[in-house]
Image (cartoon, rainbow, N blue to C red):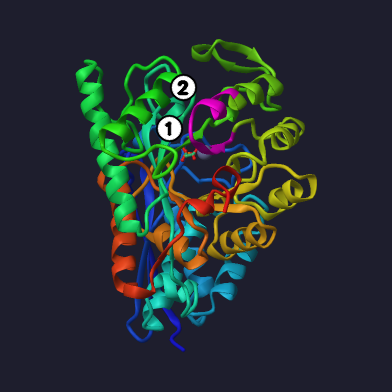
Amino acid sequence: MPLITHIHAIEILDSRGNPSLEVDVIADDGSFGRAAVPSGASTGHAEALELRDGNQNRYNGKGVLQAVNNVNGTLYEALAGIEITDQIRIDRTLLEIDGTDNKSNLGANALLGVSLAAAKCGAKASDLPLFRYLGDDQTNILPVPLLNVINGGAHADNNLDVQEFMLVPAGFDTFKEALRAGTECFHALKKLLNEKGMSTGVGDEGGFAPELATARESLDLLMASIETAGFRPGDQVYVALDVAAGEVGTREGPPYRLPGEGLEDASSEQLTDWYASLLASYPLVSIEDGLGDEDWNGWKKLTEALGEKVQLVGDDLFVTNTDRIKRGLSEGIANAVLIKPNQIGTLSETLAAVKLASSSSYGVMISHRSGETCDTTISDLAVASGCGQIKAGSASRGERIAKYNRLLRIEESLGEMASFAGATTFRQAVGN
Ligand code: PGA
Ligand code: ZN
């Protein structure tokens, strides 16, 4: 098997104009892999550390030259000569050299760039597309896309407390048709906003960021956009929320402050009741980070109250970390896990988190970050894992569309063998 001969990182820019890393890995048979690292804005406090230079003379302190140097020096020296397809050894070496739990020594951004570029190089060396290399020769499930078409919270400058309002085109036979439906609803939404004289400028993830006041107003607009586009809400197209409640609560959780919703000093129970009322009014299939990162007791009650009716996704709660997911599993907290490779820092750990969640019948949603590049690794990861769900932003902005286009290509390449995950992926809400 080919051996690693070159590893080289440079500082590039992400979709927000902030520095990030791009890493190239080359093996001695000429195989080449390139990966770029994303970056969050509403990050969970337990995420692995993203190493930034802190030098205020460059990019407001957000440069990543130290992480670049770590790749080109220490990590290259440690990995040169290792078999390119031995991902486990590559990732284990990355972890050993860093030597910390949260990757604070060399930086999770440095580690992830190398880990993903190595996997892409390994796929090339094996003459396989990445989704096959990470999956197997039976891998064939295309995920339901969750399109974040109205942005609020930390991702937009409007007053919406909830961070993401997503369209979920799940009731179709193919990914291609689902994406078309979601995109047509996105265009219908733009028209509706125009008619109301509201802004159609887009936020970080390509969704609109109009001056809407409440979640209900936003959800009503989503319903109208689905109908205007000629689809059936609650049958073909559903909706989902990412509340990112860690951003509106304290470190421990309550009190939660959602002034736009009339929830000024809300307890976990009050938020849970609010979700129940939204569930009664809208075809909601998934609620992400309904409570804060450390509000485990609140999460338990939320899961008891609503876990049979809707997918409850832990993002900042679990941070793609198997220790935190294990706690969730043993305490019956949430019923799905959001997977973001840069929250944990290596591909092997990401795959372990997916495996742990799915083997316990928790849902799995693969996710982008609000700061992205045109890297499409998560699309392959979503197909490879067969998880059935991906959120990669709205139907606009090149770095979001790149992920959806990659899925279109994968579906095409699979031909008759391709299978679309469909609405039953959201089994709590849709049943099967
Ligand atoms: P982030 O947002 O990338 O800013 O963390 C995405 C999310 O919360 O799901
Ligand atoms: Zn989230």
* Left or right of residue 153, residue 103 in this image: right
Res. 142 visible in picture:
yes
Task: Identify the residue at image location x=32%, y=40%.
Answer: 231
Q: Earlier in the sequence, mark 1 or mark 2?
A: 1
- Whether the magenta-drawn stretch holds residue 26 is answered as no
Q: What stretch is highlighted in magenta?
A: 277-289
Q: Residues within 10 Å of mark 2 (few under 14, many from 20)?
A: many
- Whether the magenta-drawn stretch holds residue 281 is answered as yes
Residue 29, label in figure:
none
Three-letter code for the amino acid on which mark 2 is drawn: Ala
Query: Residue 353: where, in percent of width, then height?
Result: 62, 58
Three-letter code for the amino acid on which mark 1 is drawn: Phe
The answer to which of 229 and 198 lies nearer the viewer is 229
Q: Residues within 10 Å of mark 1 (few under 14, many from 20)?
A: many
- Asked if disc 1 and disc 2 are in contact, CB closer than 8 Å, the reply is yes
Res. 375 visible in picture:
no
Query: Residue 184: where, in percent of width, then height?
Result: 25, 41
Residue 215, label in figure:
2
Is 336 situated above or below 33?
above
